[in-house]
Amino acid sequence: MEHSTKNIVLFGAPGAGKGTHATLLAEKYDLIHLSTGEKLRDEVARETAIGKRVKELMEHGELVGNDVVTQMVDQSLQSAPAGSSFIFDGFPRTVGQAQVLEFLLSRHNRRLDFVISIDVPREELVRRIHERALISNRSDDNEATIRHRLEEYDSKTQPVLDYYKVSGMLYSVDGSGSINETGNRILQVVGRLI
Ligand code: AMP
C-alpha cells in the first residue's frame, strides 16, 4: 500500500506551544490539525453528553478517558478525504494511546511518519501557562490545575517519548525561545522529512 500522505504527531508538555505550532504547520503543509483538547473544549462548550462527562476532569487537569479521545480520533480519520495528511496535537498522551493511534491509522490505511517533540524547560512552561492564564478563558489555566496537568504529563505522557525514541520516529526541537525561533527549528526538521 502506497503512503503518499504524511501523518505527524506534535508532542510537548502543557505550555510547550503545541497548539501554536500545529496551527502554523497545518497551514503551511495543508495538514488536518487534530487537537483533542480543542475538540474536548468544544464538547464542553456545547454541553454535549461527552462534554458533561469530561468537564470536571478537564477543570482538574486530569486526562480524560481513552475511550472518549480514541473515538474522536477514529471519527476524524474516518471522515478525512483520501490523500489528506494529519498533524496530531495533544494525542497520544499515554503509551496506550500511542498504541491505539498505530492501530487506528493502520485501519484507515495510514501510518505515523514522524514525531516532533517541542522541548521546553519546566520553569519556562510554568511561566508561559501563567502568562496564558491572564489572557485565555481556559478553565484549566489556574494554579492548582496547572500543577496537576504537569504531574499528569510527568507520570503518563513523558513515557510516550521513550516509546517513539525506540521506534526511531522521534525528532526533538528546542522550544525554549520565541515562537519564531521554535517555528524555524520545527520547519528545518519537517522540511527534511515531508
Ligand atoms: P490540551 O488542550 O491538549 O492542553 O488539553 C486540555 C485537556 O484536555 C487536558 O488537560 C486533558 O484533560 C484533556 N485531553 C486533551 N487531549 C487528551 C488526550 N489525548 N487524552 C486524555 N485527555 C486529553
Image (cartoon, rainbow, N blue to C red):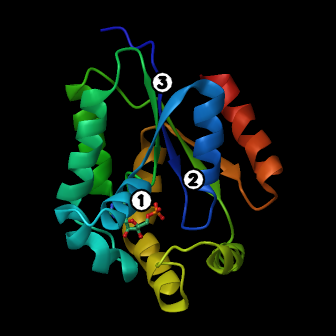
Q: What element carries label 1?
A: helix
x, y percent for residue 61: 40, 78
Which residue is at the far bottom? 144
Q: Nearer the viewer, residue 128 or 109?
A: 128
Residue at image position (27%, 20%) is 109
x, y percent for residue 136: 60, 72
Disc 2 under 8 Å from ligand 1? The reply is yes
x, y percent for residue 78: 24, 29
- The numbered mark, 3 or 2, whose residue comes first in the sequence reads 3
Figure quarter occupied by ligand 1:
bottom left
Q: Quadrant of the image for the N terminus?
A: top left
Which three-letter amino acid code belongs to the residue tagged 2?
Gly
Residue at image position (64%, 47%) is 21
Q: What element carries label 3?
A: loop
Q: How many labels does the image show?
A: 3
Q: In the image, is residue 39 above or below residue 44?
A: above
Disc 1 under 8 Å from ligand 1? The reply is yes
